Every structure is written in structure tokens, then in C-alpha cells.
Image (tube, grey):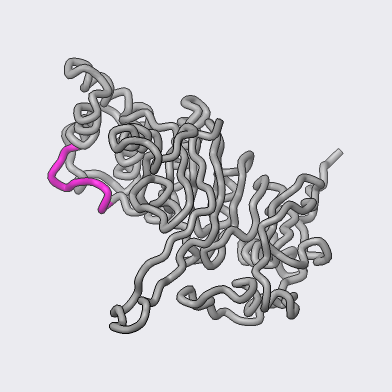
Amino acid sequence: MAVLSLSHIHKDFTVGLRPIFKPPRRLHALRDVTMELERGDIVAVVGESGCGKSTLARIAAGVSDPSSGTIRIQGMDLHAVSRAKARELRRSVQIVHQDPYAALNPTMTVYQALSAPLLIHRMVAKGQVRDRVMELLRMVGLNESHLAKYPNELSGGQRQRVVLARAFTVKPDVIVADEAVSAIDVSMRQTILSVMQRIHDEEGTAYLFITHDLGLARYFAQSGIIAVMYAGRVMEYGDTEAVIKGPRHPYTAILRQAVPDPDPELNQTQDLIPVRSTELPDLTQEETGCAFSARCPFAVDRCMSEVPALRPVAGADGRPVLVACHRAEELELPQEEPEVELA
């Protein structure tokens, strides 16, 4: 059973001043997004800024409600249960925000920040709070010396570890990591990701990992699933290695070719897909075709007039992937060269 299921999620925002005699302008941030996580799954959501990743993260974590669609936690519809039950279910999904500087109360010590959720949700007896706080700190690689420190006395990496520890105070089944390492110094990213991976392996925690970096998504969700988003829709969804090694959607292929290759000669000689435009679609307009059609070099008339469904096609390695492209079967997109094994 899925611990978190999002079904046909739509999210609209009202923009600008509301006209007196006309309906308000609405920005369609998410359009028909469906995905699910079972215990221990890692699903990486990747795409350009403005594609709806953070909106999806907030809805998945219960910070924001969808305009339509169904959210199920542990198989139960959040909008079909009592408020008390909904609050209990939402504890199963915790979010780690992008900015560790803003995520912590500057007037609370590390001990206060971690003990407060334990006491509020009665996760442990009062006499066991300190032991549990120490357990959480050790889980993220910190120690007793950090207990009395305030956020301004911690480095960026240490703050993010505290934020991660706080998310685990209520023993969630799912962690929504919204650009969780993008605000951290590059030298510390590997450490934080290793901590997150270790917790995943030891606790069986599922991750919804939000990032704009395809290389980072591949690293963290190497044995998981990747969802490529554009203009509020999922364009490609499937096994991470299958999607990245042999993308079936032109947008995924363009994202992949933007990732620097460690071999500069290979990077110069590989076939690059030209981009017709860099202009993003107007999300206040109703869809009349594929959102990526204005930028896609392979677009045909059908792409301009018909919204493609997310449907299964055979991936480059034979494994099925879901792709929202009318021409997915016929396009020959650049694939990753297989590694040569030395004898």
C-alpha cells in the first residue's frame, strides 16, 4: 500500500486584481499530477524554475491544499476523514525546506527546536525527551555540544541537519525534501545527502526529492523513480536510470544535455538538440496543446492542438516509462553511451 498517493492534482492561484464583471485570472500551477510513494521509495521531481515542483511539495506535505484531486496517506483520503484523523495522518509526511536559515526559530536552541514537537505530539514521555533528542542529533551526525546552540551559532550544513532531525521527531513515513541542499555550500551537499541516504536505508523512510538539478536527482534517486515536470505537468516518469540514459521526451533530453559532462571531448562531440525558444508558456491561459510545443524542435501540428496524455512507452532499455509526447515512439533522441568494461 502506498504511504502517500497524489491523484489528478490540480492547483490554481488567482493573480492580479479581480475584475468586477469578469472571472479572475487564474494561474494553473499544477495540471493533473499523479504519483505515489510506497515505504522506502525515492521519487525525484526535477524541472526548471516555475514548473510547479515546490507547489507540488507543499501540497504533498499538507502545507497547501489542491484546487482539485485526491491526497491519500496510508490509503486514507485526507478530505474524507475527520480533522483529528487528518492531523494524525499529516504527521506521516514531513517537509524539509530549502532555506535552513529561515526554517528555524532564531530564538530557540537546538534542544528546544527538537523537543517541542516531541512534547506537542506526545511522542515520548517527558523523562525521555532528552534521550530522544540526542538520538535524533546522532542520527544526523551532530552531538551534545550542539544542544544549547542557537541557529546563528551553526553553519549552514549544521542548520540543515537540525531541520532534518526535526522532521524525524514525529517518525514520518515520507520526507518531502524541497531543494533541501540547494542553499548549502557545495562542499556540504555530499554530507547532507549521505545522511539522508543512510536514514533512508536504516529507517525505510520514503523521499519526495525536489530539485532543479538533473544530475543531483540522478545521484540521490539512482535506484528510484524520476518525474520530469514542465509547466505544471509531468512530462516523463519512470525508473531514474532508464529515463536519464535514454529519455523519451525531448524536454528530458534537453535537460540532460545541459548537465556538464566530465569528459570535455565527449561533451563537444555529442549530438545536441536545438531549442526553438527559451520562452516559458503563459500558465494563465488554457491549454491548447503540448506546453512544450513552442520550444520543441520536433513539434508538429498535432502538438499545437492536442494535449498529450501521460502514457506508457518502451524505454531505451526495454523498461516501460510514462511519457507525455505524441511522437515518443518515433523520435530518436540522444542516448547515454554505455560504459566500456575493461578486461
- Residue 226, placed above or below residue 279: above
- Residue 288, placed above or below residue 131: below
Front residue of 341 and 92: 92
- The quarter of the image holding the N terminus is top right
Query: Where does the image place residue 42, in percent across and percent down from the top left?
Result: 55, 40
The span shown in magenta is 101-109
Residue found farthest to the left: 107
- Residue 167, placed above or below residue 103: above
Residue 264 seen in render:
no
In this rendering, would 224 be left or right of 58?
A: right
Front residue of 291 and 118: 291
Q: Quadrant of residue 123?
A: top left
Front residue of 169 and 288: 288
In this rendering, would 319 be left or right of 203?
A: right
Residue drawn at x 37%, y 32% as measured from the top left: 141
Query: Where does the image place residue 3, in percent across and percent down from the top left?
Result: 49, 34
Residue drawn at x 32%, y 84% as measured from the top left: 21
Within the magenta stretch, is there residue 166?
no
Residue drawn at x 58%, y 56% as measured from the top left: 214
Residue drawn at x 29%, y 28% as measured from the top left: 143
Query: Where does the image place residue 163, in percent across and percent down from the top left?
Result: 31, 41
Within the magenta stretch, is there residue 102?
yes
Residue 199 seen in render:
yes
